[in-house]
Image (cartoon, rainbow, N blue to C red):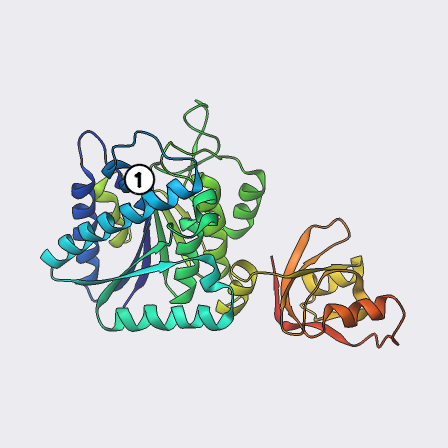
Amino acid sequence: MKKWVVKIGTSILRGNEDQSTEQVIESLCKSLTSFILKGNKVILVTSGAVGLGCKKLNLNTRPKELSTLQAVAAIGQVNLMTLYEKTMKKLGHNIAQILITKTDFDSRESFNNASKTFKKLIDLNVIPIVNENDSIANEELKYGDNDTLSALVALAINANKLILLTDIENLYSKDPRNNEDAHPIKEVNSNQLKIIKDKNIQNYNNEWGTGGITTKLIAAEIATKGGVEVQLADGRNENNLINIFNEKKIGTIFHPVDKPVGNKKSWLSHAIKTVGQITLDEGACLAIEQKGASLLVVGVKEVEGDFTVNQAVRIVNTNKKEVAKGITSMSSDSLKRILNKKENINSSMIVVHRDVLALT
């Protein structure tokens, strides 16, 4: 049995002159059915609430004011789920709507609760349909982060694969719309992905989608670090998803790392909200990055923010570049007193244990 997550973006769901939104959803649901009937499990992460809300209200452009975006999203979400429910019912499937905000993954407990809900639904042969709660989640509406959400969902259910359906055929070396010499990139390993993401070689959006390729690269990094293969493909071609379900190498495949960091450290790296920052000296950075060591108090140079024991912090080098995130074993007040020489320093005191420290 395979457990896959499929993410479809607004630019696909809006349809075009030849295919309506209803037809796009019908084709998508039929493809998902073919996969499920082989004994597999699937979760659908869908964008489209804002786009469909605009369509319902006859708005020709995506609103820029936050409150208007949220209102439009609330209208569009009803329409979106109605279309999915109507189509899936015809095909003999039950669906469940799950609306998530980033704060729902802030704590380990809430992340685990979401994971249990997803797993129970698919055990009950129900198809979870997940979307960011656009009507209240202002960060989602600013950054268009359903790509990241889909990666976190894939980690939450220990998925085998994440499929990102978008409006380009592949990842390209350059923006193919403006560069005739752009060439498709068919396969990407973990080392190549980091280089590509850091260069941000291809950052463009269309009018309705908000993520662009950058968020897809971030999603690919999150998922592959957790051991999930990612496949980016053109969702405008209705045959592509069927072919992917049949293990065809279409679009761009991002291969998982050789040694996945695991569900917990993936959550630490990408989902947790930090409340403070700890700056390390060069030796401490090398120890945690190359030796997998715990962060000891002797390596701390500066403490910023106010945090208590068991809260999350960013860990940065002297250039303020983030190297890790972790759960602290000491409060900010205790660390500051030590740094100010108001307490005796025990160099072996652990600030962040390696089991709750994740490189970023």
312 to the left or right of 207 = right
Amino acid type at circle 1 is Gly
Q: Position of residue 271 (x, y in %)?
A: 51, 60
At 73% from the left and 65% from the top, the residue drawn is 287
Q: Which residue, given by chain and number where applicable, does mark 1 sit on? A: 51
Q: Position of residue 308 (x, y in %)?
A: 67, 71
Residue located farthest toward the left when viewing the structure as drawn:
90
26 to the left or right of 329 = left
Question: Is disc 1 surrounded by few (<14), some (14 to 19) or many (20+) residues within 10 Å?
Answer: many
Q: Do we see residue 256 in this rendering?
A: no
Nearest the camera: 196 or 357?
357
344 to the left or right of 258 = right
At 33% from the left and 68% from the top, the residue drawn is 118
Q: Position of residue 109 (x, y in %)?
A: 48, 73
Vertical order, 264 against 195 (above or below): below
At 29% from the left and 32% from the top, the residue drawn is 59
Q: Position of residue 28 (x, y in %)?
A: 21, 48
Element type where label 1 sits in the image: helix
Vertical order, 132 against 63 (above or below): below
Q: Do we see residue 19 in this rendering?
A: yes
